[in-house]
Image (tube, rainbow, N blue to C red):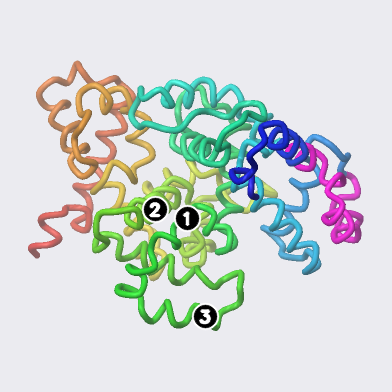
Amino acid sequence: RNMSAIGSPLCKERVHGYALAVSENALANAPLAAACSADISKHCAAVQPGGGRVLDCLERVARTRAQLAPQCAEQVLSQMAAELADPSTSFGLRRDCSVEVSLFCKAAAKGRGLHSWPAPLSNASAGNASDTSRGTLDCLRSHSRALGFRPACAARVASLTRTEMSDSRLMLLGGQLSHCREEAAQLCPNETAASKSLPVAKRYTGLMQCLQAKHAKLPEGACRVKVRSSLRVLAYFPTANSPLLAECRDQFTAYCGAPDGVDLMEDDALLRCLREHRALFTGGCRAKVMSIERMAHNEMDFNAEVSEACAVELRTQCRGVDSRQQLSCLERMGEVRAAKLAPTCSRVLQGFKERAAQSVELMGKVSSVC
């Protein structure tokens, strides 16, 4: 957890190697193995140690059933905190996503592509690994729906994202709240006061949700960047969006049926379903779904489908255009130079235009004036 403070490259390499080893085999983590012995016997007895399988099993139990003993749950949280602080120590991420890092995040690290990202994962390298690899995790999130992104890597990135959003303490690793103390006091005084009396695992959840709801009022700076980044994650990964699921889980189950034995669809399928069936959702669920829809229609930063389908057009024809104007930029291209839009981009863009025409809530000017 203090990798960046280690001065010796050799020491840093050894510590990194140890962190990777305990990620591969949770039983090599003595405190976790001792605290979770009963839970491993109960929930993961059929799981063969190694290959990250025991930790994957414990994470699934903690996330879906919350039946881990308290001391085991704390050790699993500690292990996940270490992997999220420096994802290059995540055995599962390195195993499942090495190809994607090479394809999508290596070039982006050199400043090419739609966004600029830090360098990709590397083997126990010297330097500030945590800053580098957290950026690579963000890069993988951004490209998780791209053509050529393998299902195993997409599942791993989604799993890490759901884990990060499951406990408010893990959100602190991204630095969102450390940059937002003044903004939180000004915009969310009630949530700031209430957070002090909440259980540790939920202490920062309400405060973060308040900042996300008021992100448009945040001044330019580090806090705004961090909060918008967290909103982007929720827009791309609805299965990690706890407020959305709290309102919509039953309706998602009814209208977006998942395969037998699976609680919810994968994120990309769930996004398509909530957009195609939004007229069926009611109550608080509809309000949450429409909030996500408005974000996607108002800013390209929050639009996973168009961002991936039209990545080339955004990079070449709309480069430098503000995120709030990029959808209009693509629409103008389609009207004036239709041949310049790739078929997939044209199809996805047309779908968004049709859905906007069907809902006054998505017609920005009409909605605000009327």
Mark 2 → mark 3, Cα distance in angstroms: 22 Å
Q: Mark 3 = which residue?
A: 196
Residue in the image at 30% along x and 27% along y: 345
Please determine whether, in this image, residue 232 is positioned above or below residue 136.
below
Residue in the image at 78% along x and 64% along y: 68
Q: Is label 3 in a helix, a strand or a loop?
A: loop
Q: Quadrant of the C terminus?
A: bottom left
Q: Closer to the N terminus: mark 2 or mark 3?
A: 3
How far across and down, in percent of the image, does residue 2 sit?
64, 49
Q: Is label 1 in a helix, a strand or a loop?
A: loop
How far across and down, in percent of the image, does residue 44 sit?
85, 50
Q: Mark 2 = which residue?
A: 226
Mark 2 is surrounded, within 10 Å at the Cα level, by few (under 14), some (14 to 19) or many (20 or more) other residues, namely many
How far across and down, in percent of the image, does residue 240 sit?
53, 54
Would residue 106 be found to the left or right of residue 277 on screen? right
Choose between 36 and 20: the one closer to the eye: 20
Circles 2 and 3: CB atoms closer than 8 Å: no
**In magenta stretch: residue 44:** yes
Q: Quadrant of residue 184?
A: bottom left
Residue in the image at 67% along x and 51% along y: 80
Residue 175 is labelled as 1
Mark 1 → mark 3, Cα distance in angstroms: 19 Å
- Residues shaded magenta: 20-46
Can residue 286 be seen at all in this image of the molecule? no
Residue in the image at 63% along x and 53% along y: 263
**In magenta stretch: residue 160:** no
Circles 1 and 3: CB atoms closer than 8 Å: no
